[in-house]
Image (cartoon, rainbow, N blue to C red):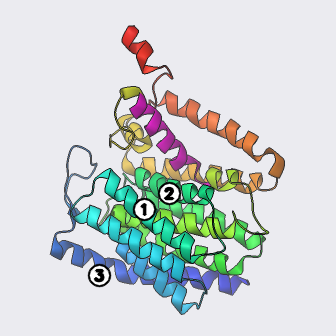
Amino acid sequence: MNQLSVVIPMLIGFGLTLLFTPIVRAIAEKIGLVDQPNERRINVVPVPTGGGLAIFLAFFTAAKLMHYPGLLPYATGGIVIALVGLIDDYRGLNAGFKFIGQVMAVGIFLWLQPSVSGIIIAIWMLSVINVINFIDGLDGLATGVIVIAAFALFSLAYDLGLSSISGLVLILVGTSLGFLPFNFNPAKIFLGDTGAMLLGFLFAALTAEGLLQGVSRINLSVPVMILALPVMDTCCAIIRRWQQGVPFYQADKQHFHHRLLDLGLNQWQVALCAYMLCFASAGTALFLARFNGHQPIILLIVGSVFMWGASKIGLVGPLVMRSHRRVL
């Protein structure tokens, strides 16, 4: 893959997203697909949502124009996950129905993609879909995280000589970058569950086919490290809700971005802080890829540092059993 072929997929994805996003935004306003302010949301005015439809159209149009093979599993699974997200954005779905839709999308992808299989891969894909969806609570946050993570994924796939996967990852970078001007604060349109789950699905699927299977397989610690911020934010949410005695899927306003806002940062500052952390974790992951035998140990060390920082800003409370608190 020469320099020109690196730039072209990104530019096509970027340009198509710039084209499709205003159209999707206008349609969303017309049909009432709008995110209304409430006690759980940061936006104080109604904002059109469902912007993931623009990313879906741009990604697969660009991939088709570039004549990349093997698109059927991605497109079919992507349709399912985007449709589930769109229904949730428009009408609302409970956590159980949403999870069933995610399982269907992942199952279809694995069924249609014979080179990818295994329960670990399925768990990885479902986890990534949800960690990206969980962190999508601030203008430009999830979109920017995926831009950084996908570029790191491209670097790994390129080094491994996976030209087709590299090209698709570059399209993901381009479409996410194209959406960011509309999504950064003050957002003109939100990703919605349509976009957040789609971005998570595409990143997870490309990782599964490109890095976790076949002769070029790498340790799962590397892609986990790439997504260290959303992964740790989700882990903290699960621990926090367990400590509070509520279901782990029950939404709250105590995520990473909420806590930094509570500490006095504005949305731009929180997003840029998140981007810097993602750059650091992605760079660490690229370094980590060179040390196969020590990856889990390094991941554990980095995870411990993240958890220490999380406790300092109040993402989790003291790690004590709920039953002990009742006795006290």
Image spot of residue 138 (x, y percent):
37, 52
Q: Residues within 10 Å of mark 2 (few under 14, many from 20)?
A: many
Mark 2 and mark 1 lie on one chain; the one further toward the N terminus is 1
Mark 3 neighbour class, 10 Å CA radius: few under 14, some 14 to 19, many 20 or more: few
Q: Nearer the viewer, residue 226 or 221?
A: 221
Which quadrant is home to the N terminus?
bottom right
Residue 23 is labelled as: 3
Q: Name the residue under label 2.
A: 126
Q: Where is residue 45 in the image (x, y as percent from the top left)?
A: 19, 56
- Residue numbers of the magenta segment: 226-242
Q: How far, Cα to Cα, is label 3 from label 2?
A: 30 Å
Q: What residue type is labelled 1?
A: Gln
Q: Which of marks 1 and 3 is in front?
A: 1
Q: Residue at x 33, y 51 (%)?
A: 95
Type of the residue with mark 3: Ile
Does residue 315 show up? Answer: no
- For discs 3 and 2, the disc positioned in front in the rendered view: 2
Image-quadrant location for residue 150: bottom right
Q: Would you say residue 236 sits in the magenta stretch?
A: yes
Q: Mark 1 points at which residue?
A: 102
